[in-house]
Image (cartoon, grey):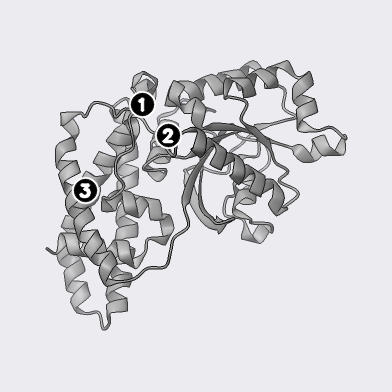
């Protein structure tokens, strides 16, 4: 994959230099404090209309079998229970699965919806390994469904197709009728054309039956996507811009906070308290920066024109902004320590 042309407006060269500098510091940190081996990360973005089982599928992938354990709120009807993008993760089948759920992003064209698309980009930094395009197998494939798919392609460009799996929900009803997914596709030309558009990559899921095997098969198909794409994850200039803007916002916010953090650090009674302090500050900073950059992406027009942008290779994930986002809600002491080393040098 070829890297897109850098845009001087976003100080790409400065960002590269900053990443290299932090990377060297992080090597020192890693050598000083041993860390347990980490499972390979697979970033998964759920895309689809409200009412098609998107959030329920996220819970199934995460292994949340009981209602009280659900990470993503599930509602019935046509009104989305999710107003903002959310990210949760778990370790299953030897992989760290990072799942990003989105609102019904294509239900409306409001500014709020487009900002949430920006949040999806930020939360899935440095880029998703796969998009799961969720659609109910028992749904009539109407003009509205077709427009939803076309909107998805316009948003993320032609290059999104190799990274997309069509995830059919409602398999419980199909199985009750004694029909397999392949049989349904063979007699439904519109669904058959849909999966062909995305390279015949599809999977069926029963969100009422929480067995490991259906999720294991999905994870295997995600691995196939990764192999087909030679280990690359999806990215375009929107993702590169988000990385640079996130670095900038996080740096600005943390530099403003630094005097207060150092003052509080001096009152800590142990190294563990210091690590916890930095972890909490990093998490709060990343969340604030994510919201800011989501709005920046929308205001710069990336949401509406991203289909025109060339696909670029991924930025190195050495920068702490990217590292913190990849870590999600579980930002670890190692990342926080890297921040501390950088900002207190």
**Numbered label attached to residue 234:** 2
Q: Which quarter of the rendering shows the C terminus?
A: bottom left
Q: Which of marks 1 and 3 precedes in the sequence? A: 3
Q: Which quarter of the rendering shows the N terminus?
A: top left
Report which quarter residue 5 is drawn in: top left
Q: Is residue 61 left or right of residue 306?
A: right
Residue at disc 2, secondary structure: loop
Residue depicted at x 15% and y 30%: 8
Residue 252 in sight in this render = no
Distance CA(mark 2)–CA(mark 3):
21 Å
Disc 1 + disc 2, Cβ < 8 Å: yes
Q: Which of marks 2 and 1 precedes in the sequence? A: 2
x then y, percent, for residue 289: 30, 47
Residue at disc 1, secondary structure: loop
x then y, percent, for residue 42: 49, 47
What residue is pinned by disc 1?
311
* Above or below, 49 relative to 345: above
What residue is pinned by disc 3?
19
Disc 2 + disc 3, Cβ < 8 Å: no
Residue depicted at x 72% and y 52%: 210
Q: Is residue 58 left or right of residue 84?
A: right
Residue 221 in sight in this render = yes
């Amino acid at each position: 994959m070829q890297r897109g042309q850098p845009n001087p407006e976003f100080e790409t060269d400065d960002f590269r230099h900053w990443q290299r500098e932090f990377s060297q510091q992080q090597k020192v940190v890693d050598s000083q404090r041993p860390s347990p081996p980490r499972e390979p990360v697979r970033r998964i973005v759920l895309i689809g209309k409200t009412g098609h089982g998107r959030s329920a599928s996220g819970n199934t992938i995460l292994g949340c079998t009981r209602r009280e354990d659900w990470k993503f709120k599930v509602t019935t009807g046509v009104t989305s229970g999710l107003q903002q993008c959310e990210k949760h993760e778990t370790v299953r089948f030897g992989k760290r699965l990072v799942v990003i759920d989105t609102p019904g992003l294509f239900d409306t064209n409001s500014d709020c919806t487009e900002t949430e698309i920006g949040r999806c980009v930020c939360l899935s930094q440095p880029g998703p390994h796969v998009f799961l395009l969720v659609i109910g197998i028992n749904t009539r494939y109407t003009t509205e469904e077709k427009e939803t798919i076309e909107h998805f392609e316009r948003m993320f460009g032609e290059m999104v197709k190799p990274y997309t799996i069509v995830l059919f929900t409602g398999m419980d009803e199909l199985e009750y009728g004694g029909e397999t997914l392949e049989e349904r596709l063979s007699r439904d030309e519109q669904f058959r054309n849909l999966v062909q558009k995305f390279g015949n990559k599809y999977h069926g899921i029963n969100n009422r039956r929480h067995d490991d095997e259906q999720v294991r098969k999905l994870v295997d198909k995600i691995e196939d996507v990764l192999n087909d794409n030679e280990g690359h994850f999806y990215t375009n200039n929107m993702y590169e811009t988000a990385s640079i803007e996130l670095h900038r916002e996080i740096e600005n916010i943390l530099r403003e906070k630094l005097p207060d953090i150092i003052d509080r650090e001096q009152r800590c009674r142990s190294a563990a308290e210091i690590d916890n302090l930095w972890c909490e500050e990093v998490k709060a900073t990343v969340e604030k920066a994510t919201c800011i950059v989501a709005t920046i992406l929308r205001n710069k027009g990336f949401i509406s024109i991203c289909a025109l942008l060339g696909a670029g290779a991924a930025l190195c994930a050495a920068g702490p902004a990217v590292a913190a986002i990849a870590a999600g809600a579980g930002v670890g002491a190692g990342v926080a320590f890297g921040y501390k080393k950088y900002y207190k040098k």
